[in-house]
Amino acid sequence: MPRQLHLSAAIDVAIDTAADAATDSPRHLDPGHYAALARLAERAGLDFVTLDDSFTAEPSRPDALATLARIAPLTSRIGLVPTVTTTHTEPFHTSISLNTLDWVSGGRAGWLVGVSTTEAEAKAFGRRPVAPEDELWAEAADAAEVAARLWDSWEDDAEIRDTATGRFIDRDKLHYIDFEGRHFSVRGPSITPRPPQGRPVVAVPVAAADLARDASPGGRARVATAIRYADVVLLDAPDRAARLTAATELRLRSGEQLRILARLDAALPGRAAEQRLLAELTATGTGVDGFHLVPAEPERDLAALAERIAPALRDAGLLRTGYPGRTLRDHLGLPRPASRYARAGNATATATATATARPTTATALAEVTR
């Protein structure tokens, strides 16, 4: 039986100035429109949707994290993955915001890690000049480490809610994280209970060029961050050969627990375009676990995906018939990580860490093709 695909989609709305001028609530600022797009992706059975964001001055773009938190109650299964930038921000605030998204969505939150690379964005904050990209990704790695520690800083059973004694939490099950790094110093613990998923899913964008021998320092730093912290890599590659080469390298360096989704344009103006996309999705020997689809017109393209392409993939045995659970980790087949601070005993913690560790090269090689 063929291995089933993991699929996701971007729901960034293309701005149509003329159309938006004719309405009191432009689509790109209407949470109902984003909810409708997410529900289309949910109907297609996709694992998650992404919504891009940055500190570039664009009044037409909503805050991605706030928007997905707003539509979380209007969806039931689809994962919600906003871009959240680590530059010019504090990882403590990032961690609790993503934790909140995980709670309001019932365990469907993810984090697409972004960095801020422009002088204009640096000036908007006024804290420091723009930094080299490799330094920005090193900072992003520290932010991901801090966030993971903060998510772990409450043990799963820290809340006791004992009305008889008036105790809400067991203080012995809250932990300082005592992070000291080049970019941050964070003591913790978090101010929010541990997320439903343990840790929200972390995604990092990587380009095939970042894995080349002549990759830029920024590209190498981005790959290092992905290898260390990503649950999902969104891979940009110019063609199938480059995709396979890059995916193989990522798999060898990280292992089978990493989900690699190749970015794929998904403009679907007609049946010919749908057939081309279907051929790309059903190709074998890709080296990836699935695809991150980037629609040109999300409403039209996601409808085509839900109505025709997804059913065709199911008929071919390449797409599941329903969601396997309620959380984004369930959709992706990823285990729920144990808190590194849990006092269940060192032996249990070690066994859990071993079970979820990156596998050996031999195991990883088996995952290169499907």
Image (cartoon, rainbow, N blue to C red):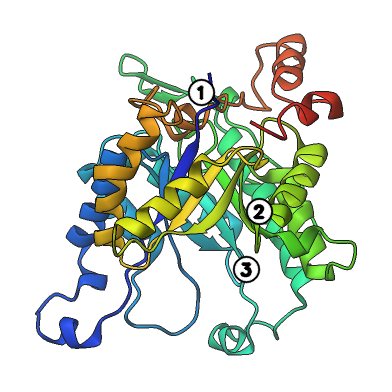
Secondary structure of the residue carrying tag 1 is loop
Quarter of the image where one finds residue 283: top right
User: Which quadrant is home to the C terminus?
Assistant: top right
Quarter of the image where one finds residue 344: top right
Q: Residue at x 38, y 64 (%)?
A: 267
Q: Which residue was labeled with disc 2? A: 240
Secondary structure of the residue carrying tag 2 is helix
Q: Earlier in the sequence, mark 1 or mark 3?
A: 3
Identity of the residue furthest to the right in this view: 213
Amino acid at circle 2: Arg
Neighbour tally class for label 2: few under 14, some 14-19, many 20 plus, Cα within 10 Å: some
Q: Which mark is residue 115?
A: 3
Neighbour tally class for label 3: few under 14, some 14-19, many 20 plus, Cα within 10 Å: some
Q: Residue at x 27, y 51 (%)?
A: 304
Q: Nearer the viewer, residue 191 or 86?
A: 86
User: Considering only vertical position in the picture, is 272 above or below 189?
Assistant: below
Depth check, mark 3 against mark 2: the one in front is 2
Q: Earlier in the sequence, mark 1 or mark 2?
A: 1
The percent coordinates of residue 120 (x first, y second) are 58, 89
Q: Are marks 1 and 2 in contact (CB under 8 Å)?
A: no
Query: Does residue 151 appear left or right of residue 47 in this picture?
Result: right
Q: Which mark is residue 156?
A: 1
Query: Does residue 90 appear left or right of residue 38 in this picture?
Result: right
Q: Nearer the viewer, residue 365 or 273?
A: 273
Secondary structure of the residue carrying tag 3 is loop
Q: Nearer the viewer, residue 281 or 96?
A: 281
Amino acid at circle 1: Asp
The percent coordinates of residue 41 (x first, y second) are 31, 46
Quarter of the image where one finds residue 319: top left
